[in-house]
């Protein structure tokens, strides 16, 4: 059976794909899928996924986090071997940052106190 779910994460400061993958590794996730590694750099608006061998994880992370690709959407597939499930991590913002949510400065908010 196949299930689909989308989760949008908003980061308050720049993140690297490498940092996110390392954080997920502690929970059993990795770039290594049964048939290798899948990644993409959307430098032509085609979302053309590429394949690499499992021993090329460091090279793949270098490519997607490269300054040459900072202006493009990038993605990697992740896989949890114990659960035999996986998904795509898409970094959709060109600079991979999002401003922190603005706090209200209306009456009653901490910023509005005299």
Image (tube, rainbow, N blue to C red):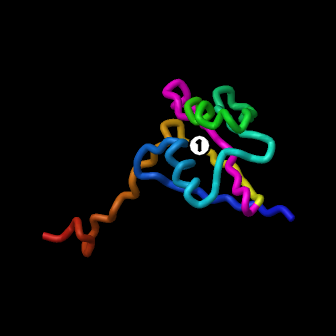
Q: Residue shown at 74%/63% (left/top)?
A: 83
What percent of the width, then of the height, locates residue 42?
Answer: 65, 32
Q: Which is nearer the eye, 48 or 36?
A: 36
Q: Is residue 80 magenta?
A: yes
Q: Residues within 10 Å of mark 1 (few under 14, many from 20)?
A: some
Q: Is residue 102 magenta?
A: no
- Would you say 28 lies left or right of 35 here? left
Residue extending furthest right? 1
- Would you say 25 lies left or right of 34 here? left
* 29 to 50, vertically: above or below: below
Q: Which is nearer the eye, 8 or 49?
A: 49
Q: Quadrant of residue 53?
A: top right
- Would you say 56 lies left or right of 72 here? right
Please count the marks in the image. 1
Which part of the image, by quadrant, shows the C terminus?
Answer: bottom left
What percent of the width, then of the height, locates residue 31?
Answer: 66, 45
Which part of the image, by quadrant, shows the N terminus?
Answer: bottom right
Residue extending furthest top? 68
What percent of the width, then of the height, locates residue 43?
Answer: 64, 27
Residue extending furthest left? 114
- Tell me where the magenta segment starts and ends, as one range: 64-83
What percent of the width, then of the height, locates residue 85?
Answer: 75, 58
Q: Which is nearer the eye, 43 or 29?
A: 29
Q: Residue shown at 79%/63% (left/top)?
A: 3
Q: Residue shown at 66%/42% (left/top)?
A: 76
Q: Residue shown at 72%/35% (left/top)?
A: 47
**Which residue lies under the disc numbered 1?**
92
Element at label 1 = loop
* 106 to 87, vertically: above or below: below
Residue extending furthest bottom? 108
């Amino acid at each position: 059976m196949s299930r689909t779910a989308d989760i949008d994460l908003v980061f308050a400061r720049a993140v690297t794909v490498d940092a996110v993958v390392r954080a997920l590794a502690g929970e059993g996730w990795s770039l290594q899928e049964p048939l290798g590694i899948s990644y993409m750099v959307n430098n032509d608006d085609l979302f053309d996924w590429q394949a690499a061998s499992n021993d090329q994880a460091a090279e793949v992370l270098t490519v997607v986090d490269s300054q040459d690709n900072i202006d493009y959407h990038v993605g990697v597939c992740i896989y949890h071997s114990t659960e035999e499930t996986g998904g795509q991590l898409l970094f959709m913002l060109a600079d991979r940052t999002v401003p922190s949510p603005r706090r209200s400065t209306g009456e009653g908010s901490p910023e509005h106190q005299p």
